[in-house]
Amino acid sequence: MTECWEADCEREAAVELHIPWDANRKVCTGHARVWAQKDGVVAEPLDDYGEEWR
Ligand SMILES: [Zn+2]
């Protein structure tokens, strides 16, 4: 599995973030929701987890 990119988080990454000012990152759904609030960030579900992403 791929772990969430966030340092203190050990959950499985479920979403890839496309960040205009930085490299793409893979994070868990909880962190993806936080990131999705930022301007320009696009959260794309990883294929295997598409149905868990709401
Ligand atoms: Zn996380």
Image (cartoon, grey):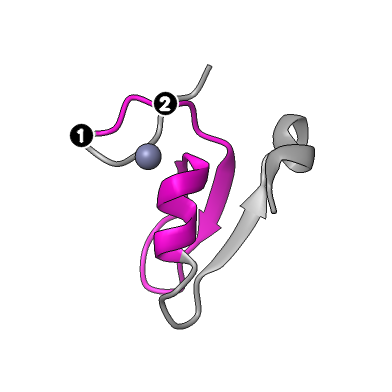
| Amino acid marked by disc 2 | Glu
- Callout 1: SS: loop
Does the magenta-highlighted stretch encompass residue 26?
A: yes
Q: Quadrant of residue 6?
A: top left
Q: Which disc number belongs to residue 8? A: 1
| Amino acid marked by disc 1 | Asp
Does the magenta-highlighted stretch encompass residue 25?
A: yes
Task: Choose mark 1 or mark 2, whichever is in front.
Answer: 1
Q: Residue 8, relative to residue 54: is it above or below?
A: above
Image: magenta residue range:
9-35
Q: Residue 54, relative to residue 46: is it above or below?
A: below
Q: Give the labeled residue for mark 2.
A: 3
Q: How many marks?
A: 2
Residue projecting furthest to the top? 1
Mark 1 vs ligand 1: CB under 8 Å? no
Residue at point 48% right, 26% down? Answer: 12
Residue 17 percent location from the top left of the image: 52, 56
Q: Is residue 8 left or right of residue 23?
A: left
- Callout 2: SS: loop
Residue at point 40% right, 62% down? Answer: 34
Residue 16 percent location from the top left of the image: 56, 48
